Amino acid sequence: MPDLSSNLAGIKSPNPFWLASAPPTNSGYQIMKAFDAGWGGAVWKTLGVPVVNVSSRYAAVNYRNTRMMGLNNIELITDRPLADNLREIEEVKKYFPEHAVIASLMVESKEQWHQIVKDVENAGCDGIELNFGCPHGMCERGMGSAVGQEPNVLKTIVGWVMEVATVPVIVKLTPNISDITVPALAAVEGGGNAISLINTIQSVIGVDLDTFVPYPVVDGKSTNGGYCGPAVKPIALNMVKNCAQHPDMNLPISGIGGIENWRDAAEHILLGATNVQVCTAVMHYGFGIIREILPGFERYMTEKGFNTMDDMIGKSVNNVKTWENLNLKYKVVASIDEKKCIECQLCYTACEDGAHQAIGLKEVGEGRVPYIIEENCVGCNLCSLVCPVEECITMVRRDDGTEHETWKEYMENDKAPTTFDDDRAGGKHHWVPAPADALKKKK
Amino acid sequence: MAEYTRPTSEKEVAQNFESIKPLMNPTMAHYESSRCLYCYDAPCVQACPTSIDIPLFIRQINTGNVDGAAQTIYDANYFGNACGKVCPTEVLCEGACVYNNQDVKPIEIGRLQSFATTKVQQENKHLYKAGAPNGKKVAIIGAGPAGISCACELRLHGYEVDIFEAKEQPSGLALYGCAPYKITNKEVLDEMAYLQDQFEYKVHYNYRIETAGQLAELEEKYDAIFLGIGLGNTNTFKLQGVDLENCTGATEFIEQIKLKPLTTAVGKRVIVIGGGNTAMDAASESARMGAEEVTLIYRRSKEDMGAYEFEYDLAKAVGVKGLFSAAPLAIVGKEKVEGVYLVKTKVEDGKVTNEEGSEFLLPCDMVILATGQQKQVTFLEQIEGLELDGKGRIKVDENTFQTTNPKYFASGDAVNGGAEVVNACGEAKKAAQAIHQTLSN
């Protein structure tokens, strides 16, 4: 049995699955329930200055029959009294001494930071997370993402916290910035012990087409919210990877963004996260989803021979390169398994209209299974992505694996092409239909 | 006891004939429409006799444009809801759904179609209005699927249209012939009212055109005449005893059930003779009307039946028993039917022959003949120059739908010999377009 115990900058938890600071961690009741269900840690809903919340706070993107593919919210930090939260932190730690309870904090002045750090430490929290990410409401008051977007301010505030903190400090970053490694390095320079990312992405989720008011609606008006849920995972993975790869970013990472099942968690961890935090999936399905995450993750670790979390963390980091380091001689082409094809011809229309006209249809009466025009296939994957049948369209390697050339090598050896003679696009073998041929196609 | 007891109230009739394709609610429609793959050159469209752009209307339902979905359907087929419910979708659109190739349940296209069309009907959203009058008049004989479809299309082009219907109600076999568990009378008539509201054609009910004099009058008053007359009564082939009391034709029996279910007489032990879809309907409906024992008799094997497999399955599901390779020799009884004298058959060189000495009597108290409908030859022979083919079907030009008398056009069962509602709708729409072309030249 693999050992799932986790250690993020000295914060220990029985497993790497934490609840992110958000509505599911609003109270001791919820967190006790979550720990009882199997979660390893929880980052308390952000404590800080008094706030007032609005009514109507969330809105979602549904994709066809899938609800809440993405969620946005305009809720602020906790609106429960600090004393209540502190008392509950203490109580939770009494019941669950082995579980990680992290206090998420957001205040303004140095004095406030010093005071609240002491307060939560006195309550017995195992770590502190600095909320520099919230992209709505609080940022208008100079907090949240307003800090995360100003590396110098971020560094200064981390410094204030480090002056008094005795437990590990995690700096939570906003993705609403062009280069995530800049605030990550500021966190390093400020003396933080770990970073967590991503917070939510600034967003407008959609518009009520009858009233012309975007969602969520507050008395006929809306405001931008923070976007999260399955839709943001790819953005989160990229940012986690960027931080994990940066040579000067030597802090452990808590990965957040779009995690709903064991696979999502494994991806974050393979790309460099030491542990992960989950919110939207719990808001959708409740704490019970940990029942799927834990055994799925454990089975995966066993299958891959990972005995501890350290065996697994960052395994994929070195498999992400800059484009210029990719092998230009690698070539795959699509292959259709005629026995599996259900004849929807989605691959045909996708390639014909959306790619390289590399899939053909047989004459009427000869069947509906499309065929690959290999000379035109650039190996883009599109057909295999749209195919609704598992393993029907696969990408088959065509180069013999002996050649390896990269753009970087071209540049270094002064071999940059001066003509358009790539085999795979408008060059020697690939053909492009004449524009007017478009009008001859049967509709 | 049989599964169904004799219904004694409208409520019990409704229970016994509960819809097999009930109206979807918006949640069901959303989930089902989400499954559509939006195939290229979609096989479902190719399989539809009216070529409805099915992936398009399903996507329109999915994006909340249900009115647009209804428009897509009605643009191709004026009997949008009726066809969604009575079409043999299992062998048409849904049978062609590519999901079948993956052993995944095909999209419930028929029910989605009815979902969209029912919504616009219930909200009385008008999608069409008649074209500006073009001064020309067309008479339509028969307010069945062919006649009504032709009328709608002609009205779009501004023709004045008079429909002459022998019966009391419109829609022909959609009303009088379709099994109630497929579609209710109300559903059929609601759609008819919805169409007439928009297209404003005139229908003269209880107005049978049967004499040469009437035809001459129509020829004089109208620029063209469309024959949407369908078929006639059940064929009574030369079988001893067909005149006995409690021996009836399937079409007539089904019509009775549709119009007066509570007073339609049904035997305790019913024998249905025939192997087509109408035989399956008649057998199913007998069982649902409370018959204790219903036996289908077909002279060839089960596999040879003309009925769709799912129609036989529907009949079996309500307790109907099949008796194959048996041919009726005579219906026996004094005044009323008492049984059918049968003989076992075998097929030799493709021909059915009776096995001598294998005769037996199957007692029953009702016989339903589902042996096809007659062509309306006597009526048609009054039209000058109108030619019929060897099977009594009206000959038409396949492109213009014009008969051999240039004043007359025709489509539907009278031309195709008897097919589905959807075939009549598709053909009549094309015929109307051809009439428009011809009269415009």
Image: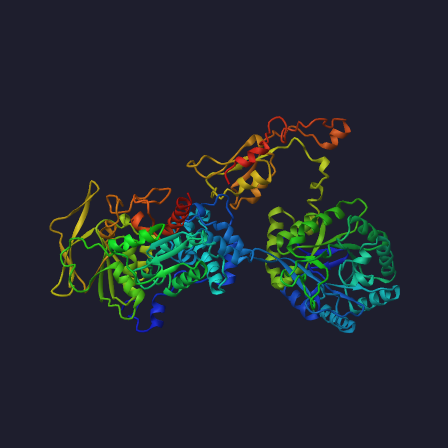
Residue A423 vs B423, above or below: the answer is above
Q: Is residue B30 left or right of residue A181?
A: left
Percent position (x, y) of residue B130? Answer: 46, 56
In the image, A403 versus B126, the foreground residue is B126
- Give me the residue at 71% from left, 32% from top: A406
Q: Is residue A115 visible?
A: yes
- Count of numbered badges drawn on the protein: 0
Rendered image coloring scheme: rainbow
In the image, B352 versus B232, the foreground residue is B232
Q: Is residue B88 visible?
A: no
Percent position (x, y) of residue A196? Answer: 75, 55
In the image, B112 versus A317, the foreground residue is B112
Q: Is residue A362 left or right of residue A426?
A: left
Percent position (x, y) of residue A102? Answer: 75, 63
Residue A307 vs B66, above or below: the answer is above
Q: Is residue B423 left or right of residue B300?
A: right
Percent position (x, y) of residue A297? Answer: 62, 53
In the image, A92 versus B299, the foreground residue is B299
